[in-house]
Image (cartoon, helix red, strand yellow):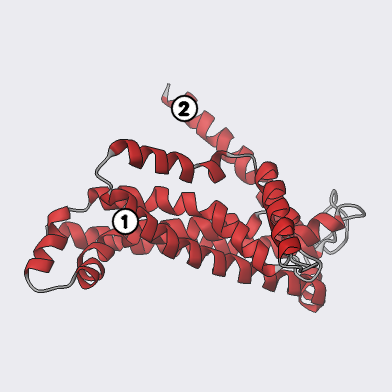
Amino acid sequence: MKALSRIYIALVLIFLYAPIAVLLLYSFNSSTSTIVFNGFSLQWYKVLFADGTTLRALYNTLLLAVCSSVIATVIGTAASVGIEKFKKSALRSSIMAATNIPMMNPEIVTGVSMMLLFVFIGKIIRIDSVLGFGTMLIAHVTFNLPYIILTVLPKLRQTDKNLAEAAMDLGCKPFSAFFKVVFPAITPGIITGMIMAFTLSLDDFIISYFTSGPGFQTLPIVIFSMTKKRVKPDMYALSALIFISILILLILYNIAQQKSEEKTEKKH
């Protein structure tokens, strides 16, 4: 049974990571072939850094991902604290059900409905080109919020509620007690939610496609426009760089979280 379980895990890992391995390999291919590896070369990385359109789309994508993840984290953390303070379980369940709708709803439904809402508001305030960075930012914050709440709430429930009350008894104001006692305890959940929101915003296409305007396009939209003809090999290089960056970020976070847990165990 152990051998079969190991084989099964190996097959799952191969199925998940084989496409990424092929992508990394062919980002160093000296030719445009996607079948034959003709030799090692860095030419597609050079072409990538010389492509102004792609770099602009990458900048837009990173800007949108950072802004939406930070805003969603602030709002989601505040919402989690408020939800946790509700005494009535029925009210709390209703709010959680409403919060989870953007996560459970199909992305195409969310994208089309938000586009119609933005266009409707634009007609009311008499703005023709309402779609752009602002509408995409609102849309990304909307579908990121449930993931922030779902990662912060468990940390709040694990935190001893008497700690904040003890801090206020010792002279801290409620705002100060939260940031000195509660906030450090829920920081791992906040960071996890922010990283998740960042990665979700980074690769979102469907909602971005419906809420974007001609003046602001993200990388997934630009790559989709290339599929009508052919995806250029420099996109392999860009995808490889994004994957490596996300991988390094997750490794560093896991190392920092492990060290934090070790320090906490030593204190106890």
The answer to whether one can see residue 47 in this image is no
Camera-side residue of 100 and 205: 100
Camera-side residue of 73 and 5: 73
Q: Amino acid at mark 2?
A: Ser
Q: Is residue 227 above or below residue 58?
A: above
Name the mark nearer the viewer: 2 or 1. Answer: 1
Rate crowding at label 1 as few (under 14), some (14 to 19) or many (20 or more) other CA atoms within 10 Å. some
* C-alpha distance separating marks 2 and 1: 41 Å
Q: Is residue 85 above or below residue 174?
A: above
Hey, which residue is sitting farthest right in the picture?
229
Q: In the figure, residue 202 lies in which quadrant?
A: bottom right
Q: Which residue is mark 2?
A: 5
Among the two numbered marks 2 and 1 on one chain, the one whose residue lies closer to the N terminus: 2
Disc number at residue 219?
none
Question: Can you say which quadrant of the picture contains the N terminus?
Answer: top left
116 relative position to 200: left or right: right
Q: Is residue 4 above or below residue 244?
A: above
Camera-side residue of 86 and 176: 86
x 7%, y 67%: residue: 169
Q: Amino acid at mark 1?
A: Val
Q: Which residue is mark 1?
A: 81
Q: Which element is circle 1 on?
A: helix
Question: Can you say which quadrant of the picture contains the C terminus?
Answer: bottom left
